Image: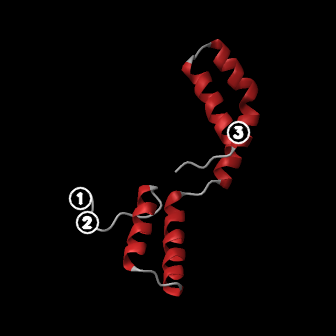
Amino acid sequence: MRVMNHLTQSLIESLTQLLKKPGQDTLKSLEICAPVLIDELQQIKDNALDRRDLMPLIQTALNEWLQQHPQPEGAVEDLIDALRRQALAPAPKGAGE
């Protein structure tokens, strides 16, 4: 799953291109852009959600919803499998060991 705003994508692409060809031009570009880069990176850091923090929230919300809206067992398993494929649900204990 990949969720990024346009600014984040542009910043990553620009930095990647600059760093692929290190040299005087790169250093000069980074020197000139540093204040803006620092501000933008700080905003990204401040607004980012850590997946480790998000996963328990999704799991709790899903569990509460399923308690209020019971579903056939097969539907619940299919939903959890779909979430797992999208890396939005933890793997069952013992899986992948």
The residue tagged with tag 2: helix, strand or loop? loop
Mark 3 vs mark 1: which is more N-terminal? Answer: 3
Gap in Å between the C-alphas at discs 3 and 1? Answer: 41 Å
What residue is at 54 percent from the left and 80 percent from the top?
65
- Reading the image, the residue beneath label 1 is 97
The label number, if any, that marks residue 38 in the structure image: 3
Q: How crowded is mark 1: few (under 14 residues within 10 Å), some or many (20 or more)?
A: few
Q: Nearer the viewer, residue 22 or 83?
A: 83
Where does the image place residue 58, in percent across and percent down from the top left? 53, 69
Going by the picture, which residue comes out furthest to the left?
Answer: 97
Q: What element carries label 1?
A: loop
Query: 88 left or right of 32?
Result: left
Mark 1 residue type? Glu
Disc 3 secondary structure class = helix
Quadrant in the picture for residue 20: top right
Q: Determine which residue is flagged by label 2.
A: 94
- Quadrant, the C terminus: bottom left
The picture places residue 84, in percent across and down from the top left corner, at: 41, 60
Q: How far apart are marks 1 and 2 (CA)?
A: 6 Å
Question: Vertically, is 35 above or below 65?
Answer: above
Foreground mark, 2 or 3, reads 2
Q: Position of residue 83 (x, y in %)?
A: 46, 62
Verify CB contact (< 8 Å) between mark 2 and mark 3: no
Q: How crowded is mark 2: few (under 14 residues within 10 Å), some or many (20 or more)?
A: few
Crowding around mark 3 (Cα neighbors within 10 Å: few <14, some 14 to 19, many 20+) is few
Q: What residue type is labelled 2?
A: Gly
The residue drawn where x is 67% and y is 54% is 47
Number of the label disc, if any, that sits on residue 42: none
Residue 79, percent from left and from top: 44, 68
Q: How many marks?
A: 3
Which residue: 42% across, 56% down?
Answer: 85
